[in-house]
Image (cartoon, rainbow, N blue to C red):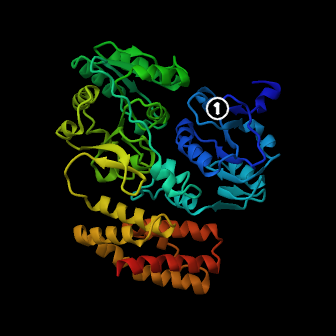
Amino acid sequence: MAGNDAIRPFSASGMGTDMTDKRPILVLQMQRMGDLILSYPLMLWLTRQYPGHPIFVAAEEMFYKPLMNLSPAVTYFPWTGAHALKQHTYELVLNLSIQEKAALLAGEIKAERKLGPTQTTDGTRFVHGNWQLYRTSLVRNNLYNRYHWAELNALDVVPLAHIASTRFDAPRTLPSSVRKIGLFLGASDKAKRPSAQFWATLIDELHGRNLRPVLFGGPAEIPLGKEVEKTAKAPALNLCGTLGLNEFSAVGQSMALFITPDTGPMHLAAWTGLKCLNLSMGNVNPWETGPYSPGHYILRPDRDCAKGCWQCSRERLYCHDPFVPSRIANLTALMAAGDTVAKLFKMNLPGLTLFQTNKGDNGLYHIKRLDTVLPDEERLISRFWQTFFGYRFGLWDKNPLSTTWTGLTENAPQAAEALLAHIPEMGRQFKHGVRHGSLLDDSFWIGSPAIIRPLTGYAHMFLENSDYSRHAWTAILELLETLIEVCH
């Protein structure tokens, strides 16, 4: 766009900017397409939480503009229009971006309340909001996290009751005569997507089950699409690089199933009601970035190194091995036919676990494991930490936390003992911090056992965010006292 058009706001409702006498809400979202789509629930919740307040969203124009007809009714601004955003005083500014220019903009804008990272021109950076800070603490530390990104966007400002009461339409189940299966080939990281050979073999296996694969991808996937076409023995319609985002969402309406790694088009497909099978491989965590609405499916390797993986440190990607094309094709045939969860449960998928997206009893995102295996140690620990932070930040009372601790002690006693064993050392370090403003040992954070790292990782970020003030050390000691109270 040229001239004044470069800073013209775009309204997803088609009405232009809707100015009222109420101060607007501003969301800064300059991440990728998937992150923008995972902000859609937040936009809906904000309109309910702040009735009559205009909702402004600053985002990358290349992502939001093609999706205007699918977005909630908000007004978008391109990042080139940042100076126009500074002309308003806001009821709330919520920065969901990690980039420095977003934090600087959040720091400059006048607002009654700010959440997320802000930064001053002298480089002072601060993260506002318990949940925004919690998300920051997950960097390289997300093994036991059970909060989805879409909800972490919102929990500092949107009541849990609003999130819990939100209902989405179930993904479409088309007639069994519809045989087209969408395959999205690419992902932002090679570790997150299957190989060309996998896709080519899957095409052949799908044809053997009377299914018609269709290849999808953006411009970056054009070479991969050609390689897959060349390698496969059977033909497949290759649409890589030929469709815009709005065209993709329209074509997706005719697919019985969409098989995809964890990537932006997966979130677009889920938002538009296309049933997804997410091949969750590589350094992703489906609890954080799986398809958000209920009724989609996730296949995740059972390997310990595949749980909460931030970056692969192995000599090769072992988590890709269990994804055998013939088994994926069998599963696809059942899903395309609309078979029940009971039938899917009987599938033989060695090395893989099949999940279905859902809402948990607490009203938050949940992925339900479709087998009868009792909760393992990792799931029990994760449930405990989810309820711990939920209690600490006011989502619920102490009862769920006490229940998950009892479940951990009864079903994984060694894990519970390992957690308890580290409490004295945490107390010693934190009490020293209250008196002297520093730890006894700087290696304490990185040397913490994995089971306790959700707390020590958050404590580290909290102290850093509070400039290691005495008040911050006292608050962290109180956090530890909450843990002691529950565990004894």
Q: Is residue 294 left or right of residue 331?
A: right
Q: Quadrant of the C terminus?
A: bottom left
Residue 257 lies in quadrant: top left
Residue under label 1, please give it. Answer: 12
| Residue 437 point in image, percent of width and height | 61, 81
Q: Is residue 397 left or right of residue 409?
A: right
Instruction: Please state which amino acid type lies under the numbered disc 1.
Output: Ala
Residue 446 in view here:
no
The residue at 47%/36% (across/down) is 267
The residue at 57%/43% (across/down) is 44
Residue 227 in view here:
yes
Is 272 situated above or below 133? above
Depth check: give the residue in front, 357 or 438: 357
| Residue 319 point in image, percent of width and height | 31, 43
| Residue 292 point in image, percent of width and height | 44, 42
Tag 1, which secondary structure?
loop
Total numbered badges shown on the rendered structure: 1
